[in-house]
């Protein structure tokens, strides 16, 4: 255990070891094979008070060690750091009407459907709130062998409920949202988000489609024995995103703890002055408050793009109701308490070597509680 504990655990401003309990939670999780390694960080009062790492890329003794700045496949955290953030800025600049019907942006979504089909009433707001009526998941990759074919299949996907009547976390919804935002902006997601979000915030380790030379420095997500038949390292794990050439509204982004803390600090500083977020404030307070508000239907914890704490939430017991966050299938998480001005990031590759372990869901609330208790 001491070998893992001394890997790369560090905390800025906490020489008294105030986060020992946090490190112990993560070290225990590694010992239970919840994930082979992790990087983690905490922002409080505008300052990074913890940024560390434990474990290795895989469970092999000679595997590379995870560092505090290691880049991970953040999976569905893409939905907030890229797609939702893009929607927030386009809305803020008057370029996006979130109540616009999706069919007006992507006509292929309604063409060919019966006149009374609910698809004609799906708005961009519904996609952001996961209340469009679209199913949660569809294995498009099994039959769609090109980007165009997958997008066509997604556009033609039947609704399972009337828009606004059911909350169903939907990857297809965010695939379509990402495409709609590209049409509105007149530019692909990677170029727009890099220029308008990542570069201004100094997020130099955040990108889609990592360059081949950087892939060995990224922890692998799985040994894919079903589809690609190789170790997935430095390329997106999500199969639908892979068919989309690694770029999608629902997955595909790679990032590090320091970069995600920079992004979250910009959210916290909504409308604020200059500082470490690199300028005069990326998001306005009005925008953040609007996108952080729960949307319904009744019982849904979803805001616009973001999730909020609910009963038994992975955020644990201490995040206020005025908090927003998101999880990633690979075992990554980002939670922002807008009231307490606290951010907690955890990046893992819990799907290594396969997707069978679900222990991360037990680790998340205990980890977040340990952080808040340490603060």
Image (spheres, rainbow, N blue to C red):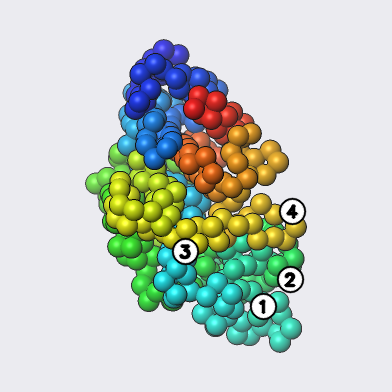
**Whole-number angstrom distance, CA of label 4 to CA of label 2:** 16 Å
Q: Which residue is mark 1?
A: 121
> The residue tagged with tag 2: helix, strand or loop?
loop
> The residue tagged with tag 3: helix, strand or loop?
helix
Q: Residues within 10 Å of mark 3 (few under 14, many from 20)?
A: many
Q: Residues within 10 Å of mark 2 (few under 14, many from 20)?
A: some
Looking at the image, is mark 4 or mark 3 earlier in the sequence?
Answer: 3
Q: Residues within 10 Å of mark 1 (few under 14, many from 20)?
A: some
Q: Which residue is mark 2?
A: 162
The answer to whether residue 276 is left or right of residue 375 is left
Quarter the N terminus occupies: top left
Taking depth in this image into account, of 114 and 150 the one nearest to the observer is: 114
Q: Which residue is mark 4?
A: 299
Q: Which residue is mark 3?
A: 88
Taking depth in this image into account, of 301 and 218 the one nearest to the observer is: 301
Rendered location of residue 132, percent (x, y): 65, 67
């Amino acid at each position: 255990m001491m070998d893992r504990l001394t890997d790369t655990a560090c905390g800025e401003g906490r020489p008294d070891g105030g986060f020992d309990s946090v490190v112990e939670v993560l070290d225990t999780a590694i010992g239970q094979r919840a994930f082979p390694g992790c990087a983690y960080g905490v922002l409080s009062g505008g300052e990074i008070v913890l940024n560390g790492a434990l474990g290795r890329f895989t469970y092999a003794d000679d595997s590379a060690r995870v560092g505090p700045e290691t880049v991970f496949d953040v999976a569905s955290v893409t939905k907030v750091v890229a797609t939702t953030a893009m929607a927030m800025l386009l809305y803020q600049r008057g370029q996006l009407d979130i109540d616009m019907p999706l069919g007006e942006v992507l006509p292929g979504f309604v063409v060919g459907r019966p006149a009374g089909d609910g698809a004609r009433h799906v708005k961009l707001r519904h996609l952001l709130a996961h209340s469009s009526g679209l199913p949660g998941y569809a294995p498009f990759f099994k039959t769609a062998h090109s980007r165009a074919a997958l997008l066509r299949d997604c556009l033609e996907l039947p609704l399972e409920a009337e828009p606004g009547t059911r909350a169903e976390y939907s990857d297809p919804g965010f695939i379509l949202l990402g495409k709609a935002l590209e049409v509105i902006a007149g530019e692909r997601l990677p170029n727009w988000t890099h220029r308008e979000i990542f570069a201004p915030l100094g997020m130099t380790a955040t990108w889609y489609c990592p360059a081949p030379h950087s892939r060995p420095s990224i922890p692998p997500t799985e040994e894919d024995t079903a589809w690609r038949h190789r170790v997935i390292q430095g390329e997106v794990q999500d199969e639908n995103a892979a068919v989309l050439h690694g770029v999608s509204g629902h997955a595909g982004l790679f990032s590090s703890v320091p970069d995600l803390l920079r992004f979250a600090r910009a959210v916290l500083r909504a409308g604020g002055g200059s500082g470490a977020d690199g300028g005069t404030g990326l998001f306005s307070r009005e925008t953040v408050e609007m996108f952080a508000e729960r949307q319904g239907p009744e019982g849904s914890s979803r805001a616009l793009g973001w999730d909020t704490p609910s009963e038994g939430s992975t955020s644990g017991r201490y995040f206020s109701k005025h908090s927003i966050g998101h999880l990633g299938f690979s075992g990554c998480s980002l939670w922002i308490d807008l009231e307490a001005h606290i951010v907690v990031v955890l990046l893992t590759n819990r799907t290594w070597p396969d997707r069978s372990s679900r222990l991360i869901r037990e680790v998340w609330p205990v980890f977040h509680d340990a952080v808040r208790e340490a603060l």
